[in-house]
Image: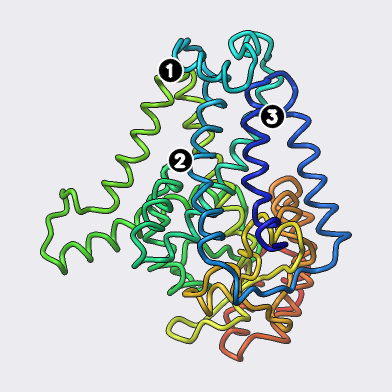
């Protein structure tokens, strides 16, 4: 029973966010502050989560995953309404009855300073509930129901490319120079966010074009998965216009982009500075891991990243722990905040771990690649080792 309760934490948080969004005011400013402290401090103080649930009830856990789509949709509607300037009477009436409040009045009492909480929280939770759950589900390529829910969850971030490039590109090319989702030593994180997003779109189109050509299907076809993905996102964008007007639609697009950047920030830390010779086997040593409790639960064991790459066919609750795999010095959210807010400190902290990786995990050929990255990294600790 515990496993079902702990993996229900994210849906519970979405329910709370739906209500807080409708209340308006400073509620989300308080929420994102308390939530961040809860995750960071919880990861530090709680013992590591090393549980594996081989005999879990798949239907219950899948229901938890699938529940993210309707909950994210309702959270999206409330957020865009509050950030927008439209007055959809029917929608307002539904929300007023649902929450027993005057949501129109609450929007009037929500000032620009309060929007900071709305944007930051939505960017983080669109990534967590949308892209991360979509990532889990779109790995199940032969499960039509999972693919349906997964692709629609990705659509909130205009990230249909992820379902193709991540599964068929990143997992094949990880830690090589051809992988847009692997950050190099000393690489500027903000530059990485933009370049990775663009390159992943290009790679996804290349993958889809090859697939269509092999199956003799025209590029401009209803069977083109990229086009279908863009249509899903366009539908959500039109809904945002109806709910929030032009202002609401612009707010939604900003949130969609920021949630994609949150995902890329996760990519940035997951394989940062790790190298692999193209054509060689992907090993557990090619991912940074964390067994921190709160991050693992909220990200549905994405933090067991070595296992995810080695056994991508396993579902999140079945992923094993690799005790000897490379470990991050802190939980995922802590490392993301550090990389985004204090990149110099992040590189200083990680340089020690990268040098340890070179000595403990790298093959001779990988040490040569790592040495080249060290030389060009601009990080003093790394450069002096060359």
Picture quarter with the C terminus: bottom right
Can you identify the residue that label 2 sits on?
A: 156
Asked if the residues shown at circle 1 and circle 3 are in contact, with their CB atoms under 8 angstroms apart, the answer is: no
C-alpha span from label 1 to label 3: 20 Å
Can you identify the residue that label 1 sits on?
A: 246
C-alpha span from label 2 to label 1: 17 Å
Number of residues whose C-alpha sits closer than 10 Å to that of mark 3, classed few (under 14), some (14–19) or many (20 or more): many
Residue 351 in the figure: left or right of residue 73: right
Q: Where residue 292 sits: x, y (%)?
A: 76, 64
Residue 166: which quarter of the image?
bottom left
Please report the residue visible at 55 percent of the width from the left and 59 percent of the height from the top.
60
Q: Where residue 123 sits: x, y (%)?
A: 59, 39
96 lies above or below 137:
above
Q: Where residue 325 sits: x, y (%)?
A: 69, 80
At numbered mark 3, what does the secondary structure look like: helix, strand or loop?
helix
7 lies above or below 48:
above
At numbered mark 1, what does the secondary structure look like: helix, strand or loop?
helix
Q: Where residue 336 sits: x, y (%)?
A: 69, 53
Number of residues whose C-alpha sits closer than 10 Å to that of mark 1, classed few (under 14), some (14–19) or many (20 or more): some
Can you identify the residue that label 3 sits on?
A: 117
Nearer the observer, 282 or 186: 282
Asked if the residues shown at circle 3 and circle 2 are in contact, with their CB atoms under 8 angstroms apart, the answer is: no
Picture quarter with the N terminus: bottom right
Please report the residue visible at 75 percent of the width from the left and 22 percent of the height from the top.
26
Residue 375: which quarter of the image?
bottom right
C-alpha span from label 3 to label 2: 19 Å
Q: Report the disc number at residue 88.
A: none
């Amino acid at each position: 029973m515990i496993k079902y309760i702990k993996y229900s934490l994210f849906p519970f948080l979405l329910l709370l966010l739906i209500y807080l969004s409708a209340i308006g005011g400073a509620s989300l400013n308080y929420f994102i502050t308390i939530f961040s402290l809860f995750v960071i401090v919880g990861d530090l103080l709680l013992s590591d989560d090393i549980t594996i649930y081989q005999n879990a009830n798949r239907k219950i856990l899948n229901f938890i995953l699938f529940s993210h789509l309707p909950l994210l949709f309702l959270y999206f509607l409330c957020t865009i309404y509050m950030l927008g300037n439209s007055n959809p009477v029917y929608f307002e009436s539904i929300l007023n009855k649902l929450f027993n409040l005057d949501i129109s009045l609450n929007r009037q009492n929500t000032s620009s300073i309060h929007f900071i909480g709305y944007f930051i929280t939505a960017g983080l939770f669109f990534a967590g509930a949308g892209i991360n759950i979509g990532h889990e589900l779109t790995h199940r390529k032969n499960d039509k129901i999972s693919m349906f829910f997964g692709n629609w969850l990705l659509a909130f971030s205009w990230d249909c490319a992820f379902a193709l490039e991540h599964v068929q590109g990143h997992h094949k090319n990880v830690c090589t120079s051809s992988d847009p989702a692997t950050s190099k030593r000393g690489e500027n994180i903000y530059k990485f966010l933009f370049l990775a997003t663009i390159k992943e779109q290009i790679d996804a189109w290349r993958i889809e074009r090859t697939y269509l050509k092999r199956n003799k299907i025209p590029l401009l076809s209803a069977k083109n998965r990229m086009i279908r993905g863009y249509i899903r996102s366009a539908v959500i964008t039109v809904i945002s216009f109806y709910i929030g007007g032009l202002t609401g639609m612009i707010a939604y697009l900003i949130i969609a982009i920021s949630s994609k950047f949150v995902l890329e920030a996760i990519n940035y830390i997951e394989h940062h500075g790790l190298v692999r010779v193209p054509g060689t086997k992907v090993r557990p040593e090619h991912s940074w891991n964390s067994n921190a409790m709160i991050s693992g639960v909220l990200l549905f064991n994405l933090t067991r990243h070595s296992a995810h790459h080695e056994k991508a066919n396993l579902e999140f609750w079945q992923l094993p722990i690799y005790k000897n795999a490379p470990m991050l010095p802190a939980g995922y959210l802590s490392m993301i905040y550090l990389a985004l807010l204090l990149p110099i400190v992040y590189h200083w902290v990680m340089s020690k771990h990268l040098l340890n990786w070179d000595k403990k995990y790298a093959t001779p050929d990988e040490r040569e690649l790592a040495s080249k990255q060290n030389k060009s990294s601009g990080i003093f600790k790394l450069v002096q080792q060359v």
